[in-house]
Amino acid sequence: MKQIFNTNNAPAPIGPYSQAVMANGFLFLSGQVAINPETGEVTESSIAAETHQVMRNIKAVLMEASCTFAHVVKTTIFLTDMSLFAEVNEAYASYFENNFPARETVAVKGLPKGVNVEISMTAYRG
């Protein structure tokens, strides 16, 4: 059986999907972009600011499912330009204490709302 999680503390889905779905102890989080859930606007002052907004959105979804970043086992980062990797990596790393999850970073041609970074995660709460 699966359980759906959505929170007003992260941006509402912009398509037919849920913010997160739990199945058999695994929490699958949809990709988050740098939309401020309070304003509905994209945070775009810098790539670091974008990444921090993405991670705050993910944290809100994790919390809705009674999880933290310590539960995350897998991450995918999508970047529009690999030259942004170092700055994104620095901001991303600040949300984990140790035992980093598995991860890949992929360059893509474009992302929703014209953002530069999107991150999805899988957590385990079994």
Image: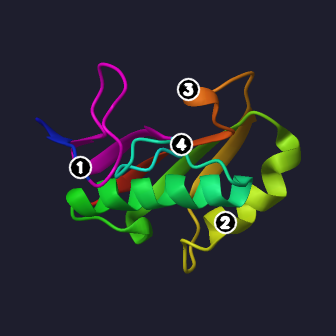
The image shows residue 68, relative to residue 116, as above or below, that is below
Q: Residues within 10 Å of mark 3 (few under 14, many from 20)?
A: few
The front one of 124 and 95 is: 95
Answer whether labels 2 and 3 touch (C-beta < 8 Å): no
Quadrant occupied by the C terminus: bottom left
Element type where label 1 sits in the image: loop
Residue type at mark 2 is Ala
Q: In this rendering, does residue 126 appear at all? A: no
Marks 2 and 3, how far apart in space?
20 Å
Answer whether labels 4 and 2 touch (C-beta < 8 Å): no
- Left or right, 24 with reference to 12: left
The numbered mark, 2 or 3, whose residue comes first in the sequence reads 2
Marks 4 and 1, how far apart in space?
16 Å
Q: Residues within 10 Å of mark 4 (few under 14, many from 20)?
A: some
The residue that mark 4 highlights is 42
Q: Nearer the viewer, mark 2 or mark 1?
A: 1
The residue that mark 2 highlights is 91
Element type where label 3 sits in the image: helix
